[in-house]
Image (cartoon, grey):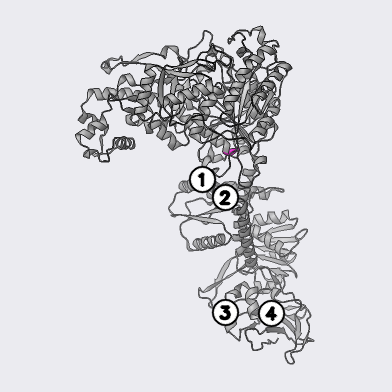
Amino acid sequence: MRICKPLLSPNATSHIVWDLPGMAAPRILWEHKPLEAARGCASCAGKRDSFKNNSQPKFFARSSGLHSRSGNDIVSFRHQHHTHKALRYYSSSAVLFNSASSAIAPAESPSTMVAEVIDGTAVAKSIRQSLNVEISQAQTVNALFKPSLTIIQVGNRPDSSTYVRMKLKAAQEANIICTVKNFSDSITEIDLLSEISALNDDPSVHGILVQLPVPDHISEIKVTNAVAPEKDVDGFGPLNVGELAKRGGSPLFVPCTPKGVMVLLETAGVELTGKNVVVLGRSDIVGSPVSYLLRNADATVTVCHSRTKAIQEYLKEADVVVSAIGKPEFVKGEWLKSGVVVIDVGTNYIPDATKKSGQRLVGDVDFESASAVASKITPVPGGVGPMTVAMLLQNVVNAAKRYYIAQAKRHITPLPLNVLEKVPSDFEISRAQKPKHIRDMAHEIGITDSELELYGPHKAKVQLSLLDRLAHRKNGKYVLVTGITPTPLGEGKSTTTVGLVQALGAHLGKIAFANVRQPSMGPTFGIKGGAAGGGYSQVIPMDEFNMHLTGDIHAISAATNLLAAAIDTRMFHESAQKDGPLYKRLVPAKRGVRTFSPVMLRRLKKLGIDKTNPNELTPAEISKFARLDIDPDTITWRRVVDCNDRHLRTITIGQGAAEKGHSRVTGFDITVASECMAVLALSNSLSDMRERLGRMVVASSKSGEPITCDDIGCGGALTALMKDAIKPNLMQTLEGTPVFVHAGPFANISIGANSVLADKMALKLAGTEPGEDEAEKSGYVVTEAGFDFTMGGERFFNIKCRSSGLVPDVVVIVATVRALKLHGGGPDVTPGVALPEVYRKEDVELLRKGCTNLTKHIANAKQYGLPVVVAINQFETDTEPEIAVIREEALKAGADDAILSNHWAEGGKGAVKLAEGVARAANKTEGKEFKLLYDVDKTVEEKLNIIAREMYGADSVELSDLARKKVETYTRQGFGNLPICVAKTQYSLSHDPALKGVPTGFTVPIRDVRASVGAGYLYALAAEIMTIPGLPTHSGFMDVEVSEDGEIEGLF
């Protein structure tokens, strides 16, 4: 053999040619253009400048490894710093070169096989570049698409650190966020598992990789198995490995190295169907999983390992060899058949005195001999290694895409509803339906496991962190359900709310939430019954809904009663001690050090005392800080119980001998009447609830200063008692649509609506991601306001919406033929007594007279600048002419539509037309101009007059002397700019329940004004409001039993 190497200029070409004895003419084996070589050969790329400056690049022949094949000698050639590994640099257009005469003639292919190198470095680079482009393009649609990988490294082994740096660099090239969490090698297994669990719960992390090995005291199996399957981008977890091993399995991720092997085979154009493939090695990391992938590609796979006999025989029959055994240059060329494809996964170091490190990296295959036999071969380094990291990055991007696709594909799977012609009792209907597991419901609507706190199989709390995760979403459509002035029987607002949501979700395919209040157990065991809806439009399980739920009301009871106890205790201790001893006991030394608690620092700030060392206060400051000097006659805070107990309405406390005569008259309210409940309903976050609880005013000092919960020192403790109660409760309807049940402020003296946080959470879950078609994908959140629109709707807008910043898209007003006949002059109706005949037969004229009440409510609602839809809640005695009259009068009054709905008897199917009408109105873009009724900076009396005139139709309000005095006090204390809640009868637009229809020419008497400063409003009493109801002769509790299998029976 002869090497022809002309002298080179920077643009000269060097040839290596075959010129062996017996050859008809020399053949070009190697053609090297120095500048192009740098582009074609990754290893030469870094030498590009030296090629330019070196006019004599050093090529040499090496005779080692020669063997005979078909009578021809095989020679391998080395560049000065590496072996050129393929004839990808050897073009089929190569020509004969006569070294003596420089004559050129067409080339003949040498009879000896010279392998094409499968360049993993180039393929991996291409993958990183394509990932970068893919991510950038995705971010033009959704800027939040940011694939993120977290690498966990325990200790700082040099080899592990090197691998981690490689992954960081590759991730940066691919535009992937990569974070390394490095832990000391002394970390315990429990602590490491806890860290992995936290990353599993972090929605911003799409992939988790544990850099192996870990220290001996930590189980690699436990650690890798702890990674959530949807974040197991290494593919080592049991779910992914198990799915890969199954025929037809669906792993979320394929292990990176085996996946890289398959991509290299595909890139090289290797057809695997029907081919014999030998896999050397059976490790869980490479050998076994790559054998599964090859089998799934319809290859015939043989796995050989250290105990396999006569490996050479298997190899001699192989069309493809994948070696991952960790033995340097174990596989020899003479073991392989001609044309075999060789994938060398091995990474082994052998001594090499020519290297600075004294060693060099080789694979499991003897490259020189194998490349002379194989048709294609991967080098080491530069073959499978770079592909492992590239596949890791591909898995991370796939994980991120899967996460965002799942968010976009959220949907509700309805429960089939077996509707009977004769509607059974509410309890029988509820018991007959088997609910979904609440975890399945959560998954359907896009709530993650880490955001869900299960309370059994059918209810759960949802963490507020969801609001941060979904903050980028545009809200869904917000629907407010209210009613006309009701009869004592109720007109079905809750039933309509649930039926409407069942129609939207189960029949129209929308994400739709019913957001309702949690009922008190007082009415449940009294006479009113539950609040889960009725008929075939209910929240289920209704017994769990109506009793205890997740304990929120009990938490509010505990918080309210703690503050009541603290008030009386503070007065007791102040009366028995002088300033110095009182202060010393309030701020005791602990381990010899006195410090103010956080709530005390709040009081100091309020008082204008900027000291933080308890020992630095002056006697005057001590007195000011320690002595609240509460006026007992001004205490407004009462104890509560979640039961209708009339005998607790007025009580005397402090009659024990130990109380030393410190008794006073007070009373109990029902728990839902507590200001703590109103605070829960109106809070926008946990921190907001803490501030609201702290500023609740419980009394005044004898000098007229407001005394707050924080002054008493209870704000933090109340927040601690209610920290779980602030999380909304997730349930479902009869047809498997989601329901948030949260908060239940007493409608008589508060907003009578569910919580702001539940609404915000549902609006995000029903909302749209960036780039989604809002008209197509937007869901609906349907909530209700207590009593009629004039009371519940007015408070909803002027108090709740003012606090939350949310604005409904449409108002639904529920009307019934029965109630409108009552307002037309029909006789009174009484619960438990048969309806008078006029309500059971057609009377169009009486009905038309009563429609004035409906038209007034429509006019009231339209003052807020929103569309209005009337829902006609159907009863079996209603007639078509009567329905036609309601529709006619509603449209005449300006309603967008008036639609008959039979959801009580038919479930969501009976409310489909109503749902379609509500959706049309909610999606209107013209004519919406939301506005509140009044400016809070007006005086208290001005705001009262606006409400009375505009909503009730009154001439004015008249304040009693007590009310006027209270208004003056609250204004002086700085609370005059709060919105107003008017507590009055729900059975009339006026203050007088006897005045039906649309009364005029009346004055609303305001007997008293009280402050709910923490909740954020004043409430004016226009009637005697009972804040703890009594029990009837026959109470609901008399019908309740528990069966032997633990099932509650006898509810409703």
Residue 185, how many percent across, how many down?
44, 55
In the image, is residue 1013 above or below residue 144?
above
Label 3 and label 1: CA atoms lie apart by 50 Å
Of badges 4 and 1, nearer the viewer stands 1
Disc nearer the start of the sequence (3/1): 3
Q: Which tag, 4 or 1, sits closer to the chain's start?
A: 4
In which quadrant is the C terminus drawn? top right
Q: Which residue is mark 2?
A: 144
Mark 1, residue position: 197
- Measure the C-alpha gap from mark 4 to mark 1: 57 Å
Q: Earlier in the sequence, mark 2 or mark 1?
A: 2
Foreground label between 3 and 2: 2
SS under mark 2: loop
Q: Which mark is residue 334?
A: none
Residue 442 vs 44, above or below: the answer is: above
Q: Residues within 10 Å of mark 1 (few under 14, many from 20)?
A: some
Q: Nearer the viewer, residue 571 or 113?
A: 571
Gap between marks 3 and 2, in whole Å?
42 Å
Closer to the camera: disc 3 or disc 4? 3
Question: Residue 624 location, x and y as percent?
Answer: 25, 31
Quarter of the image that includes the N terminus: bottom right
Do the CB atoms of the residues marked 3 and 2 lie less than 8 Å apart?
no
The structure residue drawn at horizontal position 64% and vertical position 40%, both measured from the top left corner, is 410
